[in-house]
Amino acid sequence: MLQSLISFGVGTLAALFPIANPVGAIPIFYSLTATDSPRYRLKQAQKTTFNVVLVLAVFFLAGKLILNFFGLSLPVLRIAGGLIVGHTAWEMVTARQRITASEHKAAADQEDISFTPMAVPMVSGPGAIGVVIGLSTQATQWRDYVGCVLEVAGLGIVLYLCLRLGEPLIEWLGETGMGAFNRILGFLILAIAVQLIADGVLGLLPTSAP
């Protein structure tokens, strides 16, 4: 039982981490809170983490209901998720930001950035939401749900540490280093997107009778 819980949970974290990319959220977070006090920045990091965990956990727990309500099949979801993840990956490879310049400016003028743009769409965006909905279809017993929710919480802990302690990392890597890291991660995520689309297409093809 414990092995199954750990296996499903680790699979969840492995699928979510590169797409959520908590490390990539560091520069945006610090640029949006550049003029804020350390205490306020800490509060925003805590609220961002809570919002990300809440969004992903809710979509995971309600994933099957969402698919049934809209009459969607898992292969269709995989193809759609692969396209969204691929778009995100391409933006990372080509050094484009996940949020537009106008969104960045609007966020800089607002007091609370923890839900938007930090939680949505920066970390728990359409790609990550699509992944957790897909994972929900693979959960067959209560320990699968527990394992996934625990790993979503684990992702939240990693995100919090990145936002809380990310400033030295930015200074150490510099703009060039952060850009290189995002491009490498973007390439890996692009491969994941291709796999999702391929699995979805194969799932739509009729199976040949033995």
Image (cartoon, grey):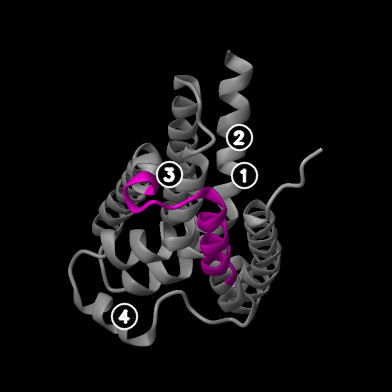
**Is 115 located above or below residue 93 in the figure?**
above
Q: Which residue is mark 3?
A: 156
The front one of 91 and 71 is 71
Dot 3 amino acid type: Gly
Of labels 2 and 4, earlier in sequence is 2
- What residue does disc 1 label? 14
* Magenta stretch in the rendered image: 67-86
Q: Quadrant of residue 181?
A: bottom right
Q: Mark 3 to mark 4: distance in Å? A: 23 Å
- Residue 135 location (% of width, % of height): 52, 41
Q: Quadrant of residue 163?
A: bottom left
Whether the residues at callouts 1 and 4 have beta carbons within 8 Å, the answer is: no
Image coordinates for residue 92, horizontal then vertical, percent:
59, 74
Would you say the residues marked 2 and 1 are in contact, meaning their CB atoms lie under 8 Å apart?
yes
- Secondary structure of the residue carrying tag 2 is helix
Q: Are marks 3 and 4 in contact (CB under 8 Å)?
A: no
Mark-to-mark CA distance, 3 and 1: 14 Å
For marks 3 and 1, the one nearer the N-term is: 1
Work out how far the residue at label 1 is from the one at label 4, CA to CA, in angstroms. 29 Å
Near mark 2 (Cα within 10 A), the count class, few <14, some 14-19 or many ≥20, is some
Q: CA distance from mark 2 to mark 1?
A: 6 Å
Q: x, y percentage for residue 28?
A: 42, 71
Q: Amino acid at mark 1?
A: Ala
Q: Which residue is mark 4?
A: 103
- The one nearer the camera, 66 or 172, is 66
For residue 10, which numbered disc appears in the image?
2
The rendered magenta stretch, by its main secondary structure, is classed as helix
Q: Is residue 180 above or below residue 1?
A: below
